Amino acid sequence: MNTPTTHPRTAEELDGSREAQAIGEVEQTVLEISAALAELRLTRDAIGNKEWLSADLAGEPSGSLDQLGSITSPLSTLSSAGCDFLTPMISFLEEPLGRLRGEPEGVSGPAGQHDAAARDAGAVAEDFGSSVESETSEWAGAAKDDYLGTATQLVDGVLSIAETAGTNAKAMIAAGEVVAQVVGIVTQLITEAVATIVPIMTRAIAAAPATFGASIAQAIPDCVAIAVDYAGRIAGKLGELIASGENLVTLIEGAVGVLKVVREGLTVIGDLAGGDSASSASAAGTPVSTVSGQDGVDPLRPLEREASRGEPAKSLETDEPGRGPGEFDDPLEGEWKPVGGVDS
């Protein structure tokens, strides 16, 4: 039985195999980045439109960040009605307000920073896209198509980072507004409870001389029972807030996962366009691409030039050990915190 004879693959065959593999990787990356950008935009709209709100909260009047800093005490009406002795007995009604309130600037400030980062990244992508169009206007052939394809994916990748930062900004503002909305709802419920309690207690106080104070003793349990009933309603609203917050966290986690796909895609494109492909082509004795007057074209070069033009691009670089150029910071990492101040 004759054993089949195998011959070593020639350099040309090996080079063709590597090229085919590289093309396959780029095509897959193209699809992943395009899908990621579309998904990030859908997530941004869902967060901005507050589609994550529970049905109960969605039907309530909206709130503004200014309400977070409110210091109004709905129970103060008891003092003006001469029933201030009752305040310590039903003070539990106001406890949620103390935990929900905060500084509006604590929300708007970080959100503004993320929004600015989104605008800066978007500007870098736009400038890069414009420079590519102008620099390749006189090019022709497959090299131009490959170059433009790679550039388009780099633009989409940077736009994905911009979308993620913008999504984070929207999430912070939206979460703050919903907490403020619940502050308004809780305040209104306490006000209603006090409005129900005051007439009962004022009648009891008026009858106190004739009953030697027995009327007040009888009214107190009734007033506390009313407060407990409203406390249950308040707890229900807090539960809706927690459920809505969990929905928002799910959307944010999805955006982070999509961003990781984009970052991996940018790394693949960077390796193939500026590193691995260049090395392979050099080993084969050929330039990266051949265009009249453009030997050895590096598709990453315009992006590097755009990054050197202004401050916004600096945010896309890193000096951290173990992370090379093109590995972008995650604008959501360690920054966003879910709706807080309420124990589940």
Image (tube, rainbow, N blue to C red):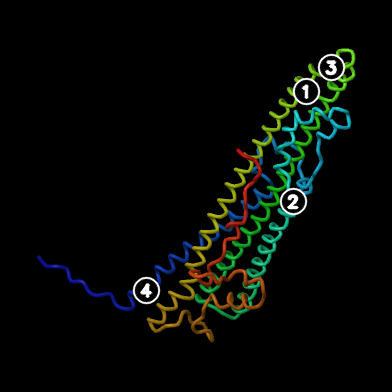
Q: Is residue 293 above or below residue 332?
A: below
Label 3 to label 1, Cα distance in Å? 16 Å
Quadrant housing the N terminus: bottom left
* Mark 3 secondary-structure assignment: loop
Q: Earlier in the sequence, mark 3 or mark 1?
A: 3
Residue 168 image position (x, y, % from top left): 64, 55
Given this view, does label 3 or label 1 mark the residue nearer the observer? 3
Quadrant housing the C terminus: top right
**Type of amino acid under label 4:** Gly
Residue assigned mark 1: 223
Q: Earlier in the sequence, mark 2 or mark 1?
A: 2
**Type of amino acid under label 1:** Cys
Q: Earlier in the sequence, mark 4 or mark 3?
A: 4
Residue assigned mark 3: 213
Is the Cβ of the residue at disc 3 closer than 8 Å to that at disc 1? no
Q: Residue furthest left?
A: 1
Q: Earlier in the sequence, mark 2 or mark 4?
A: 4
